[in-house]
Image: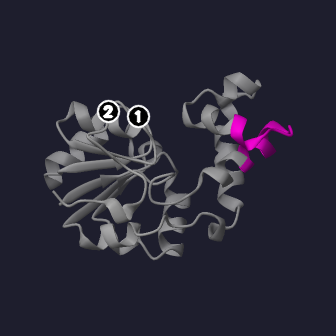
Amino acid sequence: MKILWDLDGTILDTWPTLVEAFTILAEKDLPYEEVLPHLKYGTAYEFYGVDKSLVTKFREIERTLSNERKPLFPYVKDVLSNADVNVLVTHRNRRSTEELLEHWNLGANFEEVICPADDGYSLKPDIHAYKYLHDRYGLDLAVGDQSTDLIPAKKIGLQTCSFREQNEYADQIIQCYSEFTYK
């Protein structure tokens, strides 16, 4: 199986550190449960009145938080190891992505990694990075935790797997990678 992956919230449990970084950036005492959906759906900056031009600062704050606090989801390494091809599209910048992949010894699992802002692509759900990877590797499946991960996959004809989230664009939904099926 040839799989296109998202990183945050799909391979690594980074949402807690992403929420923490946003709370630091906003300079407000914000409850995790309130901030999380706004971050996931791209409404946090507007909702909390934070200037969108600070997104680079947000990413830098999050990058400085310990990588140990951004753990792998259980069994994801098994899926990565058993796939024929793995590629990655993440909204993280190249530096942060490479640091995380190195920290968790994941780099060798990926044929190619695209960080749209660094690699000349538009952010997801734009299809161009997905189309490039599909044309190059003949992908079968995209795995992600948000609609922005799955919409471009559906548009280019890939099967989709939503991780830990109900999603109208998902062909299958799993809560744990021990449930992953190689079809």
Q: Could you tell whether 139 is left or right of 174 in the image? A: left
x, y (%) of residue 117?
47, 42
Instruction: Say which amino acid is labelled 2.
Output: Tyr
Q: Quadrant of residue 11?
A: bottom left
What quarter of the picture does the N terminus occupy? bottom left
x, y (%) of residue 94?
49, 56
Q: Nearer the viewer, residue 135 or 121?
A: 135
User: Where is 154 relative to 96, above or below?
Assistant: above
Asked if the magenta segment contains residue 116, the reply would be no
Residue 124 visible in the picture:
no
x, y (%) of residue 38?
63, 31
Asked if the magenta segment contains residue 25, the reply would be yes
Q: Could you tell whether 160 is left or right of 59 in the image? A: left
Part of the protein shown in magenta = 20-34
Q: Residues within 10 Å of mark 2 (few under 14, many from 20)?
A: many
Residue assigned mark 1: 147
The residue depicted at 81 percent of the width and 38 percent of the height is 30
Marks 2/1: CA–CA distance = 7 Å
Residue assigned mark 2: 169
- Evaluate if marks 2 and 1 touch, with contact meaning CB atoms under 8 Å apart: yes
Query: Which SS type dominates the magenta stretch?
Result: helix
The residue depicted at 37 percent of the width and 39 percent of the height is 121
Q: Residues within 10 Å of mark 1 (few under 14, many from 20)?
A: many
The residue depicted at 68 percent of the width and 22 percent of the height is 46
Q: Earlier in the sequence, mark 2 or mark 1?
A: 1
Instruction: Say which amino acid is labelled 1.
Output: Ser
Q: Which mark is residue 55?
A: none
Disc 2 element: loop
